[in-house]
Image (tube, grey):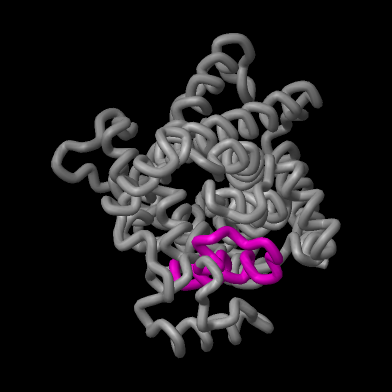
Amino acid sequence: MASEDVKPSESAVTTIVSLAEEAKMAREGVVKAPSLALLSVCKSLVAGGVAGGVSRTAVAPLERMKILLQVQNPHNIKYNGTIQGLKHIWRTEGFRGLFKGNGTNCARIVPNSAVKFFSYEQASKGILWLYRDQTGNDDAQLTPLLRLGAGACAGIIAMSATYPMDMVRGRITVQTENSPFQYRGMFHALSTVLREEGPRALYKGWLPSVIGVVPYVGLNFAVYESLKDWLIKSRPFGLVQDTDLSVTTRLACGAAAGTVGQTVAYPLDVIRRRMQMVGWSHAASVVSGDGISKTPLEYTGMVDAFRKTVRHEGFGALYKGLVPNCVKVVPSIAIAFVTYEMVKDAALKSRTRDLPLMGEGTCNRTKCDLLYYH
């Protein structure tokens, strides 16, 4: 059901991008060879995939700690905080326990990041063309609101395409040695959930995820791009040289963007994780509370999950795991953005060395950004 709802969005993005490309080629009198267009697509996908894989692996222990704090049974507390929780995992599960679920996370995040970054660039180009056509200003640039729309569109497409992998990743992550049933891996988890709970179970928590995409992914892109543009135009404190940002400055912009987006959307992330655990007949001990739970883990929907969480655990339960999340989101999002741009820049340099772009022998940073990001 959820994947069918996403198809119109993908079709709309494809249509907008096609119109934008045709208009651009008509204005410039340039017809892009199919091989070059395919190369451009592949470079965006590779850059996004590398960025996602590197950033998530770097913060995998904090990611697992966050999920454990989000879903642990309130009547049988095992993890009292980030430091204590990490020490407990190390003592009871060893080094490998810190990275439990990371393999599934990487398998999910690489295509997710690739589709997200690529969709954002294509949506941005299409929206920019429509914006310029409506305003009659060929020099107009994307506003923060338009960037938010492009980022949200990209996030919904990417999240929906890989959501079943995220759902089983959440369950694998909370497994411990004391869990009554063990998923042996991503494919075993997918087949088990499909067989025991049905196909709809693979999209439990999808609605709060979609709602959370707008502030999370949208603000990530909007804040990052706006900060980058402001720094280039105003050049405060000598941070910008020759219309380009240093890696350190890009890292700071990515960190600020990630912190804002994640904090705003965090309660929805908690509800999403809790909904993913519903219907798990052999739930991990951290979720079931080793059989001493006083509150049934059953939600009829997103609103019911919010209501029961606040009623039984208080408003603060919506922010369980926020500390490790804030610690991890800064390096995670920052590394993702910086890695993506570095890989993309390397690809651009290789391309401009071998092939002329738009009839020119070289391509400066501004034109490359306009072609690939806007």
How would you classify the magenta stretch by its main secondary structure? helix
Residue at 70%, 24% in the rendered image: 39
Q: Tell me where residue 215 appears, x and y as whole percent.
A: 48, 66
**Residue 218 within the segment the image draws in magenta:** no
**Residue 274 within the segment the image draws in magenta:** yes
Looking at the picture, tell me which residue is in the foreground, 132 or 64.
64
Residue at 41%, 33% in the rendered image: 95
Residue at 52%, 28% in the rendered image: 344
Say if 23 sits above or below 127 in the image: above
Outermost residue toward the left in this view: 237
Looking at the picture, tell me which residue is in the foreground, 282 or 355.
282
> What quarter of the picture does the C terminus occupy?
top right
- Could one spot residue 207 in this view of the protein? yes
Q: Tell me where residue 308 appears, x and y as whole percent.
A: 52, 86
Q: Tell me where residue 194 appears, x and y as whole percent.
A: 82, 57
Magenta segment range?
Answer: 266-289
Say if 293 sits above or below 85 in the image: below
> What quarter of the picture does the N terminus occupy?
bottom right
Q: Tell me where residue 208 appears, x and y as whole percent.
A: 60, 71
Say if 233 sits above or below 243 in the image: below
Looking at the picture, tell me which residue is in the foreground, 275 or 341.
275
Residue at 53%, 34% in the rendered image: 53
